[in-house]
Image (cartoon, grey):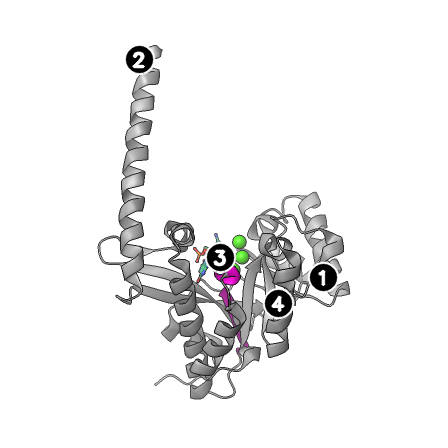
Amino acid sequence: AKGAGKGTWQRYRSDLHTAMVERLALRTSLLEAIDARQFVLQYQPIVDVRTRAAVGVEALVRWQHPERGLLGPYHFIELAEESGAIAGLGAWVLGEALRQFAAWHAADPQLALRYVSVNVSARQFRAPGFVDRVRRALADAGARPEWLLLEITESLVLRDAEQVWAELRALRELGVRIAIDDFGTGYSSLSYLRQMPVDVLKIDKSFIDDITASRQQRALVDAIVTLARNLDLTVVAEGIEDDDQRDLLERMGCPYGQGYLFARPLWPADVPPLVGAVTVA
Ligand code: C2E
Ligand code: CA
Ligand code: CA
Ligand code: CA
């Protein structure tokens, strides 16, 4: 038994070593990847739960790694946060998403999509001058503030509440809307929610996963939807994968949803055809 334990430990150590070497390699190339234009964005539609029509898109970053292929954010966002590369990466994502949205809009002023949603990491938000950088990014892209929804996390909204809330208010004064991402997974206190300067709650996928199977989970989501409505907040349910989930959410009065049932994250060229607002040549 002792020998087996040692073997396991050694394998564990060697796995750990490989993981560390990999992280180190990624960290180095991460810093160069922005200049090398290796990041790309996909866009996942956010739809009206009842009609299934897209009303917005969420920009999701991917890394087109020269050796490792297309990497999802789980492979590098945390690393980017730790190393500080998130400042440059986040700025690129914001600028690119706004440029893309402005381009769609220029191609079709009747565009059915009303906004692009952009994830903002805590470190990116807390860096000084964030509001100014958003203002400049909008101007540079020729984008209207209403076109932008910024997704931030619960923990960010709660920490240093006063400082963060002041910036959120400034952003909303610009006309930018704010969403709390992955709502329910953090520690938002309900009494806070009433005063928070935010517009949208995105209910985390983990809550949606079980709504068909679990009555308790259903009650919880129903309560969040009702609460949001009474607080004049918009709700987006994340990770809707089947019709039963959609049906339940519609009955609860959840206005918006996002998930593989409607659409996977799409390459930019596939967005206008899907939305049906632009005639493709
Ligand atoms: P998120 O903000 O919660 O984004 C939703 C994630 O769920 C996306 O994963 C999306 O592809 C996935 N998803 C959407 N619908 C479904 C579904 O029906 N089923 C399943 N199984 N998954 C679904 P993705 O693109 O891998 O992104 C993961 C996370 O990485 C995001 O979670 C977000 O927190 C972060 N992220 C993505 N792009 C950025 C970015 O530009 N900046 C920052 N700071 N974080 C980003
Ligand atoms: Ca998000
Ligand atoms: Ca989310
Ligand atoms: Ca989520």
Find residue 272 and report its horizontal and vertical position in percent: 43, 78
- State which tag comes first along the sequence, 3 or 2: 2
| Structural distance between the alpha carbons of marks 4 and 3 | 15 Å
Mark 1 lies on a secondary structure that is: helix
Residue linked to disc 3: 123
The amino acid at mark 2 is: Gly
- State which tag comes first along the sequence, 4 or 2: 2
User: Around disc 1, counting alpha carbons within 10 Å, would you say few (fewer than 14), some (14 to 19), or many (20 or more)?
Assistant: some
Residue linked to disc 2: 3
Residue at point 51%, 69% (across, down)? 129
Residue linked to disc 1: 228
- State which tag comes first along the sequence, 1 or 2: 2
Residue at point 67%, 46% (across, down)? 217
Q: Nearer the viewer, mark 4 or mark 2?
A: 4
Judge by depth and name the residue closer to the eye, 28 or 227. 28
Q: Are marks 4 and 3 in contact (CB under 8 Å)?
A: no
Left or right, 197 with respect to 33, comes to right
| Structural distance between the alpha carbons of marks 1 and 2 | 57 Å
Q: Is residue 71 above or below residue 265?
A: above
